[in-house]
Amino acid sequence: MAHHKSAKKRIRQTEKRRLHNRYYAKTTRNAIKTLRSTTDKAEAEALLPSVIGMIDKLAKRNILHKKNAANKKSKLTKFVNSL
């Protein structure tokens, strides 16, 4: 257990950040699932920009690796174009 005031604060901060990051990562995963389950091309094209924006934000904040984000965006775009 931490004994210093700064270490205790750091533990509080990291826990808060972890929960925050988990929330946004889970929300993005759900949005991706929704997009992938769509069979209507017009609906998928409407959803795609918002999902790509969510993925970009995760990459910007280092929740996702930038190359992982690029792969996800590429595969989703390919999926939407194939509908």
Image: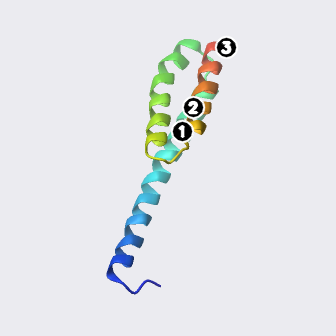
For the point 50% across and 53% down, the residue is 22
Q: Nearer the viewer, mark 3 or mark 1?
A: 1
- Farthest residue to the bottom: give it: 3
Q: Few, some or many C-alpha atoms within 10 Å of disc 3 (few <14, some 14-19, many ≥20)?
A: few
Q: Quadrant of the C terminus?
A: top right
Q: Which residue is mark 3?
A: 82
Q: As shown in the figure, which amino acid type bears the numbered disc 1?
A: Lys
Q: For residue 40, which quarter of the picture?
A: top right
Q: For residue 5, which quarter of the picture?
A: bottom left
Q: Which residue is mark 2?
A: 70
Location of residue 56 in the rendering, given as x and y in whole percent from the top left corner: 47, 34
34 relative to 5, above or below: above
Q: Earlier in the sequence, mark 3 or mark 1?
A: 1
Q: Nearer the viewer, mark 3 or mark 2?
A: 2
Q: As shown in the figure, which amino acid type bears the numbered disc 2?
A: Ala
15 relative to 29, above or below: below
For the point 43% across and 83% down, the residue is 2
Location of residue 70 in the rendering, given as x and y in whole percent from the top left corner: 57, 31
Q: Is residue 35 left or right of residue 1?
A: right
Dot label at residue 66: 1
